[in-house]
């Protein structure tokens, strides 16, 4: 079953455990400036929103890459950046409509979410279930269940 | 190894920033943050200095777990000689700033001297520079300062810790605020910062924290400890849902809620300003006061409150800048503006809270000092003319005016800004200052809870609930329940609490974890992150060493055993109502025993044997 990251901002507290887990997984350090997932703080609305790559089926970044450094991982559906091929031209960062692929000045390559090979560190670290890793074809299942539960068409006794 | 082993020394007089290696011998003895900064401070500063003189220093310090994935690992402390107290000050803050400082590669910043002009410190990884604050952020609020700095440096990811107008104006209980509403709040650390012409510290770090001693053991310990927090009813459910405000009704019912400057121990309006009230829909706009909870960096508890003030309330009707979601009332602030003054208007309390965040003020000392003003007014020692308006207990209007005037340094506000001790002395009633060593009590009555009374009297930074939270045992039954009125066993328990808290405050973790965590949960994380021996035995010794080092600083600063006391009201006037009715503080019984278990002589001075045992 193909799985996908699913984000529910209502549950996010802004603790940044996801950003730390992501950076440690990929860089071996706790360093949120190297995280592939970012939590945005809309302070005066009282909202925190984690945001990362959604692994588009027709990925703009992949198609824009002139050296084919971005490729599909068939097992996870992740669009992977191959560091040994990437030349750091940043065209993918322009092509991505969501801004979720970014240049890493320390390596001279771009970086994006790779779903950690199918076991995303961010979802594992999230203490509130704001980030989960679920069936890619049924990311709406929990929301459907919630609304289904509210549906009351039974005759009352 | 966890520590970066690098500190930044900023000489404000000369305008220089210099990197130095961290003294690792001291790190092994004092861990980090509170302990290690206090060690540096005591080695470098004469205890008799005027807190507002250039000779005082101001230290920003992180712990070895700050900026790691350990839950709540985002804390930093500010250590200095307190402007309000003249005692050692150590004020701890959460938010995101502390972790960012670590990500930039620094364990600590030592500020010394006084800048000839207002400045702010800008740190970008290894680069540190002092930049002019005049005609830029000097004179601005905490909120504007953060926005302006981010704008000038074109860096929305920067973290800012700064003072507001109160710190600039010499309010003796001015706070240092980071991330808009997280504060190193108590003892006047913001006034010291202001006296140094230092407005802000702005940090961006991209290096991270990577030198974990044993990563595998660290993740195992961190994950196990996160589960403990999650499964505990206080840290897993109570605090996220209700925040610290969960205590408002609990403490009031047990008759331990100081009310109207400690005249009473129960507040009839408590339920109107409680956590439960924050969840109720307002009749005016149909919205709840509380918007959501919020975590500090790395915290899996998330007790922080984000509230939205009622736009139709008289305090903000014409001030839209206060209308959005913003830092909300925690228990201490709600109590200090509410119970301490007999004000039961939730929106008014939130407005005062916003003013404190905006201008950099400790809400506890602010609210409690207003309580003293109101009592002086009621007994006729302060007139309407002197204050500028009527100020009886219960008046939300007077409360708000007094907070505004204090922040702006206007008129009578200048005197309020000196704190309750100096204020009540000026008007001939020093007995009405509800303080210890010059610092106002927080939200628990020292008569109703005997252990808390002893805790206040012996706290190294003046009255404070966060040096050894006896409420945990006397009310909540953590780690076991004790009778609030019992005196036996309290000195021993308090010593254990004080020493353990000193360890937590030196690690980078938040003391609220100890609702669920015991020292072994914390020990496992420290041991895995840091090289060397960090056994429970050693940590207990480190905590005790820190406590005694702080004590010795205060003794050298001129404090004596006579200062280990409470205001006469708590020693003589019994609780008027509630389950603790008639109770007065029995620190007279407990203090000799406390000195004994501390290994101090009858004058409260550590004996040579104690000093030798602790390596002081």
Image: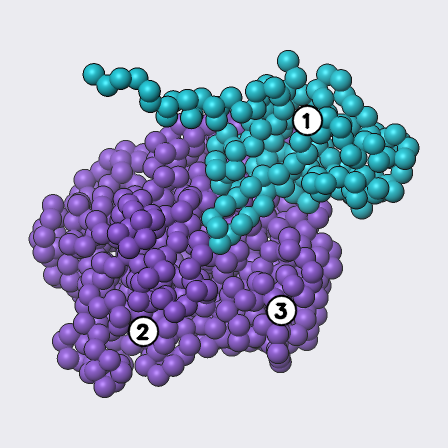
Chain colours: A cyan, B purple
Q: Is residue B170 above or below residue B311?
A: below
Q: Which chain carries label 1?
A: A
The quarter of the displayed image where residue A37 is located:
top right
Local SS, label 1: helix
Mark 3 to mark 1 CA distance (whole Å): 41 Å
* Front-most of residues B266 and B442: B266
- In the drawing, what numbered circle is on residue A115? 1
* Front-most of residues A10 and B327: A10
Number of marks in the rendered image: 3
The answer to whether one can see residue B507 in this image is no
Image quarter (top left, top right, bottom left or bottom right) of the N terminus of chain B: top right
Residue A139: x percent and y percent? 57, 24
Q: Which chain carries label 2?
A: B
- Residue with the mark numbered 3: B120
Left or right: A123 in relation to A55: left
Q: Residue at x 36, y 34 (%)?
A: B237
Viewer-nearest of labels 3 and 2? Answer: 2
Q: Which residue is drawn at 21% across and 72% down?
A: B374
Label 1 crowd (10 A; few <14 / some 14-19 / many >=20):
many
Residue B342: x percent and y percent? 20, 62
Q: Mark 3 lies on which chain?
A: B
* Front-most of residues B271 and B366: B271
Disc 3 and disc 1 on one polypeptide chain: no
Residue B364: x percent and y percent? 34, 61
- Residue with the mark numbered 2: B401
Residue B594: x percent and y percent? 29, 49
Local SS, label 3: strand
Mark 1 to mark 2 CA distance (whole Å): 54 Å
Label 3 crowd (10 A; few <14 / some 14-19 / many >=20):
many
Left or right: B396 in relation to B117: left
Q: Which residue is drawn at 70% across and 29% down?
A: A55
């Amino acid at each position: 079953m193909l799985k996908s990251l699913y984000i529910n901002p209502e549950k996010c507290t802004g603790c940044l455990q996801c950003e730390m887990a992501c950076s440690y997984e990929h860089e071996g350090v706790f360093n949120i400036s190297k995280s592939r997932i970012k939590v945005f703080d809309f302070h005066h609305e009282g909202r925190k929103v984690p945001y990362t790559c959604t692994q588009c089926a027709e990925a703009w970044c992949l198609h824009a890459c002139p050296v084919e450094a971005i490729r599909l991982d068939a097992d996870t559906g992740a669009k992977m950046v191959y560091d040994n091929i990437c030349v750091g031209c940043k065209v993918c960062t322009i092509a991505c409509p969501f801004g979720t692929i970014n240049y890493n000045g320390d390596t001279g390559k771009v970086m994006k979410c790779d779903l950690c090979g199918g076991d995303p560190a961010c979802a594992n670290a999230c203490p509130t279930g704001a980030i989960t890793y679920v069936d890619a074809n049924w990311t709406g299942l929990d929301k459907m269940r919630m609304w289904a539960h509210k549906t009351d068409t039974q005759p009352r006794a | 190894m966890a520590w970066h082993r690098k500190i930044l020394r900023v000489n404000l007089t000369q305008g220089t920033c210099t990197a130095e290696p961290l003294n690792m011998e001291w790190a092994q003895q004092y861990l980090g943050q509170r302990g290690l900064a206090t060690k540096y401070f005591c080695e470098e500063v004469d205890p008799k200095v005027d807190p507002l003189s250039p000779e005082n220093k101001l230290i920003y310090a992180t712990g070895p777990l700050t900026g790691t994935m350990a839950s709540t690992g985002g804390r930093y402390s500010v250590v200095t000689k307190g402007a309000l107290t003249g005692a050692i000050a150590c004020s701890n803050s959460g938010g995101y700033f502390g972790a960012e400082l670590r990500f930039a590669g620094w364990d600590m910043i030592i500020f010394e001297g006084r800048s000839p002009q207002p400045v702010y410190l800008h740190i970008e990884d290894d680069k540190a520079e002092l930049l002019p604050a005049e005609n830029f952020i000097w004179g601005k609020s905490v909120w504007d300062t953060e926005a302006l700095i981010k704008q000038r440096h074109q860096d929305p990811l920067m973290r800012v810790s700064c003072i507001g107008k109160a710190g600039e104006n010499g309010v003796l209980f001015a706070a240092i605020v980071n991330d808009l509403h997280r504060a190193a709040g108590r003892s006047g650390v913001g006034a010291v910062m202001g006296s140094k012409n230092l407005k802000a510290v702005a940090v961006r770090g991209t290096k991270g924290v990577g030198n974990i001693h044993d990563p595998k053991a660290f993740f195992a310990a961190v994950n196990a400890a996160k589960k403990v927090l999650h499964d505990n009813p206080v840290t897993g459910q109570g605090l996220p849902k209700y925040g610290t405000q969960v205590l408002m009704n609990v403490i009031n019912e047990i008759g331990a809620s100081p009310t109207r400057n400690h005249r009473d121990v129960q507040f009839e309006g408590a339920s109107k300003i409680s956590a439960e009230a924050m969840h109720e829909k307002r009749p005016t706009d149909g919205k709840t006061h509380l918007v959501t909870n919020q975590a500090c960096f790395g915290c899996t508890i998330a007790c922080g409150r984000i509230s939205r003030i009622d736009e139709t309330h008289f305090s903000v009707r014409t001030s839209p800048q206060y209308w959005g979601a913003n830092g909300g009332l925690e228990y201490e602030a709600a109590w200090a503006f509410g119970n301490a003054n007999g004000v039961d208007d939730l929106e008014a309390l939130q407005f005062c809270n916003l003013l404190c965040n905006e201008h950099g003020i400790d809400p506890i000392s602010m609210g409690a000092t207003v309580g003293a003003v109101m009592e002086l007014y009621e007994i006729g020692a302060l007139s309407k003319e002197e204050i500028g308006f009527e100020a009886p207990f219960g008046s939300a209007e007077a409360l708000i005016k007094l907070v505004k005037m204090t922040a702006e340094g206007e008129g009578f506000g200048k005197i309020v800004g000196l704190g309750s001790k100096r204020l009540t002395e000026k008007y001939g009633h020093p007995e009405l200052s509800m303080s210890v060593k010059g610092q106002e009590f927080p939200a628990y009555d020292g008569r109703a809870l005997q252990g808390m009374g002893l805790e206040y009297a012996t706290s190294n930074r003046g009255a404070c609930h966060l040096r050894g939270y006896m409420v945990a045992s006397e009310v909540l039954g953590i780690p076991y329940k004790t009778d609030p009125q019992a005196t036996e066993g309290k000195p021993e328990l308090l010593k254990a609490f004080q020493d353990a808290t000193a360890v937590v405050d030196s690690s980078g973790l938040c003391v609220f974890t100890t609702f669920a965590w015991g020292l072994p949960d914390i020990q496992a994380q420290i041991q895995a992150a840091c090289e060397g021996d960090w056994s429970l035995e050693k940590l207990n010794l480190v905590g005790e060493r820190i406590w005694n080092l702080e004590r010795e600083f205060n003794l050298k600063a001129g404090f004596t055993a006579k200062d280990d006391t409470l205001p006469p009201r708590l020693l003589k006037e019994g609780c008027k109502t509630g389950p603790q009715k008639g109770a007065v503080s029995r620190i007279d019984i407990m203090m000799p025993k406390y000195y004994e278990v501390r290994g101090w002589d009858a004058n409260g001075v550590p004996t040579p044997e104690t000093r030798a045992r602790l390596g002081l």
